[in-house]
Structure formats: C-alpha cells, structure tokens
Image: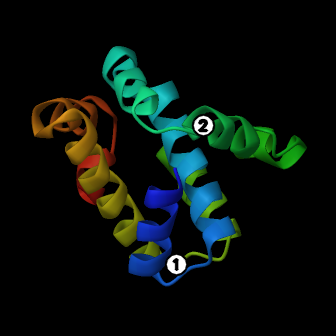
Amino acid sequence: MDELIGQLAAKAGIDDAVAEKTIGIILGFLRTEGPSDKVQALIDKIPGAEAAIATSSNSGGLGRLMGSGLMAVGTKLMGLGLGMSEIQGVARELFRFGRDKIGAGQMGEIIKGTPGLSHFA
C-alpha cells in the first residue's frame, strides 16, 4: 500500500493521508459497483487495501447521505480537496498500478464492468 500511496501522492501532488483515503474510496466503489471477483483479485494484491476501504467507508452519516455510485465517489473525493483533474490523475494512476498487479486484461474487465469508469481509464 505504501508504494501505491507514494505514487498517487507524487503524481497528483497530494499528501499521503489524502492519497490513502482516495484509494480506499475508489476501491470501495469498485467493490460495490464492479465485477466482484476481478475487483477482489485486485484488492488481494494490495496489502492494506482492506483497511483503507474500511476506513473510507466509516465516514459516518455524511457518507450515507451521499448515496452510492460514481457521483457519490466524486463528491467524497472533492470533499478531500481534490479537483476533477486530480481525481482523473489519481484514477489513472490507480488503474496503471492495478494493471501491474493483476494484468491489463483483468483491469480492463474491471473498468468495462464498472458503470461510468471508462471516462477515467
């Protein structure tokens, strides 16, 4: 996880704590909305991913009010201070990392199988 946090922080120009929260939010979204077997394979390849997802999903009442789906993810990420270009950069870096961990084919299936995600790939 530290490797991924460092990459995201450097590429997006954000601090490590925001990068970790961002990873948790995005992976949590993928787990909920994407092809579960492929997403779980990715999560299993990232040590610390489960903890990041758990932390990001414990955002209390506000998180529940935002609902689910891509719009809710965007709202959560903007709440961390990220703009749209930073969100796109973080997503692309996370997907590149995923390709390295589980292969381009499986990562492509996650992207295709998750509503709205192709805009960020």
Amino acid type of the residue tagged 2 in the rendering: Ser
33 and 5: which is toward the camera? 5
Question: Which corner quadrant holds the C terminus?
Answer: bottom left
Helix or strand or loop: what does disc 1 sit on? loop
Q: Residue at x 38, y 27 (%)?
A: 39
User: Relative to residue 22, is residue 40 drawn left or right?
Assistant: left
> Along the polypeptide, which appears first: circle 2 or circle 1?
2
The residue to which callout 2 is attached is 68
Q: Residue furthest top?
A: 37
- x%, y% of residue 100? 21, 46
Q: Residue at x 70, y 45 (%)?
A: 56
The answer to whether residue 35 is above or below residue 73 is above
- x%, y% of residue 111? 25, 39
Q: Residue at x 57, y 58 (%)?
A: 22
- x%, y% of residue 55? 75, 42
Q: Residue at x 59, y 47 (%)?
A: 25
Amino acid type of the residue tagged 1 in the rendering: Gly
Q: Residue furthest right?
A: 61
Calculate the distance from the C-alpha at mark 2 to the C-alpha at mark 1.
19 Å
User: Relative to residue 4, is residue 117 drawn left or right?
Assistant: left
Helix or strand or loop: what does disc 2 sit on? loop
- Say which quarter of the image contains residue 86: bottom left
Residue 83: assigned label: 1
Residue 67 visible in the snapshot: no
- x%, y% of residue 73? 56, 51
User: What colouring does the structure picture have?
Assistant: rainbow
Q: Nearer the viewer, mark 2 or mark 1?
A: 1
